[in-house]
Image (cartoon, rainbow, N blue to C red):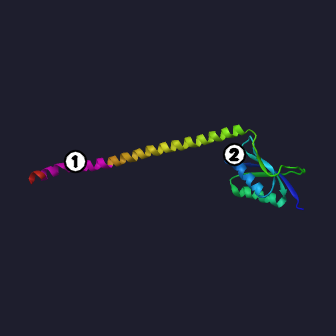
């Protein structure tokens, strides 16, 4: 029977509000681990997991490969603990989390709207450049008007 390893891990570097708990849950379930993952108030994601040593080590490697910019600090739990199976996410305050996600979505949409407004301003300037090109053509025709009038009078 394989030796079981229990870990407690803290994962940092922009891991909240980006779907990272789901990533952790998918990898843990795929490897048949027991445990749970949750967002901590400090901005990190915490997890507890239990499974065969090689499976736990592979799981941590999966997480590092998924987002190489994250920092994963894990420690072994020496006590024999029973973690829930299958692995799952814990949501402490679902309404708060939904509100935060909606706020973030609104911020992203607002930022996109500002960028679109900026593009509209640039587009309007480009349209005016087209108008300036037309004015240049008219100006060139006006510049040659005296010569053309003189030519017409000579005929």
Contact (Cβ within 8 Å) of mark 1 with mark 2: no
**On the rendered structure, is 142 left or right of 57?**
left
Q: Residues within 10 Å of mark 2 (few under 14, many from 20)?
A: some
**Residue reaching furthest front?**
86
Check residue 16 in the rendering and tell me which mark sits there, or answer none: 2
Q: Given this view, does label 1 or label 2 mark the residue nearer the observer?
A: 2
- Residue 51 image offset from top left, x and y in percent: 84, 56
| Quarter of the picture holding the N terminus | bottom right
**On the rendered structure, is 135 left or right of 15?**
left
Q: Which of the 4 quarters of the picture holds residue 4? A: bottom right
Vertical comparison of 127 with 4: above or below: above
Q: Residues within 10 Å of mark 1 (few under 14, many from 20)?
A: few
Instruction: Compute the Cα span from label 1 to label 2.
Output: 65 Å
Q: At x 75% / y 58%, what residue is drawn? A: 61
Residues drawn in magenta: 133-151
Vertical comparison of 95 with 67: above or below: above
Q: Is residue 136 magenta?
A: yes
**On the rendered structure, is 116 left or right of 96?**
left
The mark nearer the N terminus, 1 or 2, is: 2
Total number of numbered labels? 2
**On the rendered structure, is 19 left or right of 83?**
left
In the foreground, 38 or 133: 38
Q: At x 38% / y 47%, what residue is drawn? A: 127
| Quarter of the picture holding the C terminus | bottom left
Q: Secondary structure at mark 1?
A: helix
Q: At x 45% / y 44%, what residue is drawn? A: 120
- Residue 50 image offset from top left, x and y in percent: 84, 53
- Residue 28 image offset from top left, x and y in percent: 77, 55
Check residue 142 in the rendering and tell me which mark sits there, or answer none: 1
In the foreground, 26 or 47: 26
- Residue 58 image offset from top left, x and y in percent: 78, 60
Q: Secondary structure at mark 2?
A: loop
């Amino acid at each position: 029977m394989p030796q079981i390893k229990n870990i407690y891990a803290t994962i940092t570097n922009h891991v909240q509000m980006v779907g990272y708990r789901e990533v952790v849950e998918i990898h843990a379930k795929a490897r048949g681990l027991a445990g749970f993952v949750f967002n901590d108030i400090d901005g990190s994601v915490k997890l507890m997991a239990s499974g065969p040593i090689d499976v736990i080590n592979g799981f941590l490697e999966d997480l590092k490969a998924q987002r190489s910019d994250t920092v994963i600090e894990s420690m072994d739990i020496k006590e024999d603990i029973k973690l829930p199976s299958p692995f799952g996410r814990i949501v402490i305050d679902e309404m708060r989390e939904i509100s935060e996600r909606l706020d973030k979505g609104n911020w992203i949409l607002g930022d996109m709207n500002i960028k679109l407004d900026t593009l509209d301003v640039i587009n309007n300037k480009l349209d005016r450049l087209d108008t300036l090109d037309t004015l240049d053509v008219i100006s060139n025709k006006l510049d040659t008007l005296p010569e053309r009038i003189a030519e017409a009078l000579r005929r």
